[in-house]
Amino acid sequence: QKICDSRLVPSKVDTSLFVGGEAIAQAYKPNAPMKTNVCEESSSNGNNQLHKAAHWSFWRSDYKDNVPIFIKANLFSCNGGDAATRENEEVTMEVWQPRPNGTYSSIRPGIEEGDCRASVPIATTTTNSENDSLIDTNRIGAVEFETFAPGSIGILNGLVPPSSRDYPPYKPGAIHMFLNIDGYQPLLTQLSMSELNDWIPNKISKGRFKLSNGKKSFNNKGSGIEIQSVTPTPQSGYKLAIEVEVNFFLVGNGKETNDTIEDIFCSHSLHRGRLSWIPSFFKEPISVCSAAHMDFYAL
């Protein structure tokens, strides 16, 4: 109930929540391929990647072994609502993240498609039994996917080629998720590796995802996500693998989703003024809201 009370937000995604934190919307690219394996251990060019994790804001460590992550998520409606469905279309959750080496794949259409990006199918659920609890009757869907731990990004926010260097200060890697379902307000949220580290005994994680910067840079209040469990699990060939269970909370608005991606993400669609793009560029998806900048920055 506490999370649902904090989710009283407008229908537009509030990307300002992610400015200054480890999660941003800059690297979002629409139309990712449908799959349940978000990130491969090797990059799109076939080269195996080191996992780059920052333990201090000005230093990243290289690990030869990557960390598989298996995520199970339940979708709940804060105020009741229909199952997560869309007529003649499979409902998905869009997921993207940095590669293990801390770089995002290209945000240009048609390049490196599906490289640490996926549209993950949502299994819809309906619960009409009189024996269902309140939380069960508000459950509208479930989603499962697997990936590898994202690397820490730097001041360039991971928007550099894999062969290039991102510079400090570094931030924890994060798995970004976007839900846009008919009848519900859009939800943009993330799962930070620093949050997962707090759930794993240090003797097992050996501080793999801990960033000692004195504070957590992301405030989870109103983010619509709640971690239920983080469990180390055996996985052949890996020193560490983890299973994560989370809950997502959506607010119903009782209408079909007719807004375009631009309407949802881009501040200029709200006519906030001629200079509104200056702060917006650092929080909104470049490929959606500032496509012309992709040529200027060779992204």
Image (cartoon, rainbow, N blue to C red):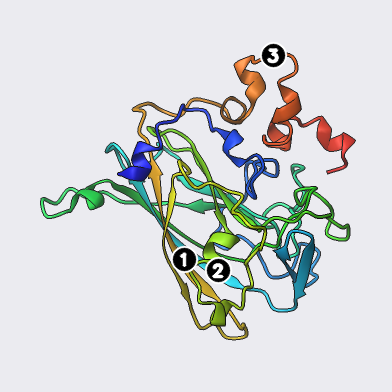
Q: Earlier in the sequence, mark 1 or mark 3?
A: 1
Task: Check the image and report above or below for 137 versus 162.
Answer: above
134 or 197, nearer to the observer: 197
Number of numbered discs visible in the structure rendering? 3
Q: Residues within 10 Å of mark 3 (few under 14, many from 20)?
A: few
Q: Would you name the residue on which mark 1 appears?
A: 244
Q: Nearer the viewer, residue 84 or 205?
A: 205
Examine the rendering and report whether any part of residue 194 can be seen.
yes
Tell me the SS state at disc 3: loop
| Picture residue at 65% right of the left edge, 43% below the top | 24
**Dot 3 or dot 2, earlier in sequence:** 2
Spatial CA span between label 1 and label 3: 42 Å
List x then y, in percent, for residue 280. Answer: 70, 29
Q: Mark 3 and mark 2: span between their CA atoms? A: 42 Å
Amino acid at circle 3: Gly
Q: Residue at x 68, y 36 (%)?
A: 283
